[in-house]
Image: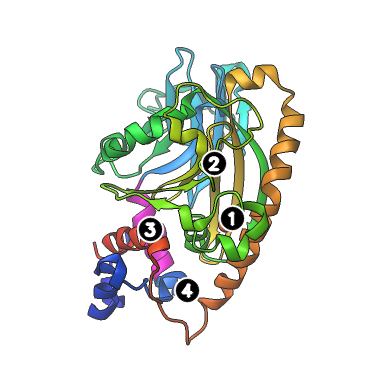
Amino acid sequence: MPSESIAPLFDAADIAAVRQPLAAASFLPPKVYSDPRVFAFEKQAMFRRTWLPVCHVSQIPEAGDYFARKLFDEPVIVVRDRDDTIRVMSNVCRHRNAVLTPSGAASCKGRRLTCPYHGWVYGLDGVLIAAPHMDKADQFTKSGIALPAIRHEIWHGFVMINFDDEAPSLLEQLAPLESKVAPYRFEDMVAIEFRRAQVDWNWKVSLENFSEAYHQPFIHPTTFDGEFPATKATYDDVEGPYGMFWMHQRNGEVPPFLVPPVEGMPDEYYRAYSVVNVYPLLHLFMDASIPLWMDWQIDDKDRHELIWYMLVPKSRLAEADTETLKAQFTAIMEPILLEDVEVCEAVGAGVRSQLARGGRASHMEKTVWQFHNWLLDQYLR
Ligand code: FES
Ligand SMILES: [Fe+2]
């Protein structure tokens, strides 16, 4: 944890502007995107005590499957054990700290994790079970040596971790969202990556862009706003570390779906898209048929990779050809995402300006204002 708080970076006027009711509010100053001290704080403190997505359970379907990735400087691995238990552990060997497995999804050979460096072997539970040529090391014993477990909770199929054992439970914090999200049944879906892009701006620029409908008529006039106009979007009040809003079909009609929608949803779900962000990094853009999950790999203050997945109900996947479905979904989403990426690039450049300011918020940016209030809670801790 950094020794210094970044609270002094925000003066009373910055704080008051964001804490106003939405109609009178302004956004946080641009230094939250551009100041290296803010990013250092996010990396060393904020992301270490908030809930972060690692993978979706469908990425590790069988016993012995794992999904590894680096979250900031922390290599982590999610493993499905023989009894279907999902474990999250450090992906760093207890010998001389080599990263055990490359990033991505794979299956453990022989249901063991073997360090590539000197061959120390761990079980799926992280316990050291073999350490070659250590018999001459005085009083060396394997017992008590294991990959450190990392706290996790599974929210509708998403494996979420927290490096802070004292942080409040995610599931408890998301209880107010439960009845709204449960009908989508992400836990019964399969995550299929369909696109990724390396981009050169601060991660919050991306999150904020995908969190409001205000920009739609200007950025997506033909690709989205015609069917789901920004003027009809509605934004929810929130009671936790999340944001949610809805984009309703122009005439309240049911739009065509790529595959038949999930059954048994409330009627309005079939006539709208919704967006949920679980702060800071879980983003979902949902229709009733194939929701989209946007994941992040944050490299630096001004650089991250966006990874887009389609979430396909297992039952629909059985009926469809995956590659065809992916091509169809990409054809619908790609033009929209390209429009978004282009405008994010403009904001990413603009927030580095010495003359940039935190501007006034529109009523169509309630979710961004909510996010800035959540961010301020983090920055002022
Ligand atoms: S670093 Fe893993 S066995 Fe040596
Ligand atoms: Fe957009």
Report the residue at 47% width, 87% height from top.
355
Task: Judge left or right: residue 191 versus residue 48.
Answer: right
Which numbered disc, 3 or 2, marks the residue closer to the eye? Answer: 2
Quick one: 109 or 381, which is closer to the camera?
381
- Residue wearing tag 1: 225
Residue 276, compared with residue 299, is above or below; it is above
Evaluate whether residue 130 shows in this view: no
Q: What segment is highlighted magenta in the picture?
A: 38-50
Which numbered disc, 1 or 3, marks the residue closer to the eye? Answer: 1
The mark tally for this picture is 4
> Image quadrant for the N terminus?
bottom left
Give me the disc on residue 44: 3
Cα separation, mark 2 vs mark 4, equals 26 Å
- Residue wearing tag 2: 293
Residue 310, compared with residue 214, is above or below; it is above
Quadrant assignment for ligand 2? bottom right
> Image quadrant for the C terminus?
bottom left
Q: Hey, what amino acid is under mark 3?
A: Gln
